[in-house]
Image: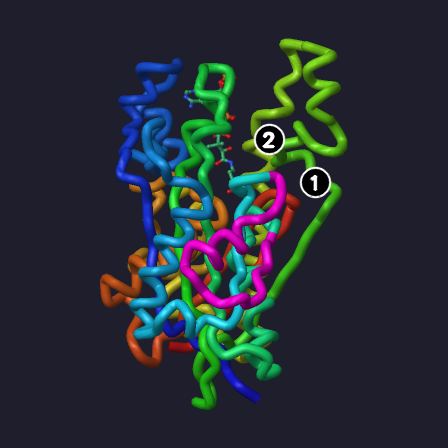
Amino acid sequence: MKNTIIAGAGHYVPENVVKNSDLQLIMETSDEWIQERTGIQERRWVASDSDDSTSSMGTKAARNAIADAGLEPNDIDFIIFATLSPDYYFPGPGVMVQEQLGIDTVGALDIRNQCSGFIYGLSVADQFIKTGQYKNILLIGSELHSGGLDKTTRGRGVSVIFGDGAGAVVLQASDEAGKGVLTTKLHSEGKHAKELALLGPSTAHWVDAIIEENNPEDLSYYPYMNGNFVFKHAVTRFQEVIYEALASAGKDSSDIDLLIPHQANLRISQYVQAKMGLAPEKVFNNIMKYGNTTAASIPIALSEAKAEGRLKKGDLLCLAAFGSGFTWGSALVQF
Ligand code: UT7
């Protein structure tokens, strides 16, 4: 059976930097509050005069990942795109990447697993590669949150957290034993679906009804998050699913060379790191610069960690995510 290695990684973030102090000008918040609760100092928000979109940012990240793998776009034989903020309701952005990269008519799969989308995509790609169906899979996580946030004091509990950006990896079949993706673990708990969600407009709450009701109290077209509730579940599930992956691969937490957690909140990462007894340098965080970029956060961090030389041959990389659904998951990758 083949193994799945990460042959290349790349990312793209919009140029427009939005600092906490910029947010203070449009809502009642403070740099102190945001940094103390989340660790975030700034995030990227696509500028109103920019033509960046979820798919085009994904394509830019993909180009960087393909180049990093030493490949050409047409070496890709399958595309997986994870996002909660697609360009359109349908079709999904996977096909747009196929078009924008000028790749032949390969399959394109869109993943709807929010913050865990990259881990879910990695797991799917790993099965395709292990069975020999595909050789080079492009996996992208991209989000454009900024246009859909409530940027007033009313929405500050959510809007200060989220940022825009994209990351991508090329996953490749390898014959080298003991290398690549060792295991992936996926979970969900749909009873908490509405604790972190954007419920309308949708087939459950059609645009016509929203317009007809004309109810100023109806904020269903903005993302809703029960922050405390999500936080409590996240810190437990992160640890649980990391230990589950370690156990199934016959590894221990002391074997982890680098943990890249989904960048939900620096306090969540630090809590997990402390509880698991990991040294701070073994946990990669960049939420300070980008905020929470949902499905893009792990591949952006992976791309930065790789470029900084933080992933050396022989290293054990652990990825973990938790978010809306609830969905969560983990992966262990041997470099
Ligand atoms: O990526 C998907 C997964 N997402 C997560 O894992 C996020 C998990 N949750 C969190 O990270 C945290 O719950 C938040 C950072 C979202 C919020 O932090 P918190 O410590 O749970 O704050 P809170 O919602 O309990 O709000 C505390 C206070 C409230 O004021 P009162 O009622 O105590 O007077 C809020 O109105 O802080 C207020 N507040 C703010 N103040 C200034 C909420 N947002 C802001 C803000 N600036 N941006």
Can residue 273 be seen here? The reply is: no
Left or right side of 274 for 91: right
Camera-side residue of 19 and 259: 19
Q: Amino acid at mark 2?
A: Asn
On whether residue 103 falls in the magenta region, the answer is yes
Q: Which residue is mark 2?
A: 226
Image coordinates of residue 65 in percent, x first then y, are: 35, 64
Image coordinates of residue 259 in percent, x first then y, are: 40, 61
Q: Which residue is mark 1?
A: 192
Residue 277 falls in image quadrant:
bottom left
- In this rendering, the answer to whether 178 lies above or below 41 is below
Question: What range is drawn magenta here?
Answer: 89-111
Dot 2 beta carbon under 8 Å from ligand 1: no
Q: Disc 2 or 1, which lies upstream in sequence? A: 1
Query: Where residue 293 is drawn, which disc sits there?
Result: none
Query: What is the crowding at mark 1: few (fewer than 14 residues within 10 Å), some, or many (at least 20)?
Result: some
Q: Considering the image in quadrants, where does the C terminus appear?
A: bottom left
- Residue at horizontal 42%, vertical 77%? 334
Residue 16 falls in image quadrant:
top left
Image coordinates of residue 120 in percent, x first then y, are: 58, 60
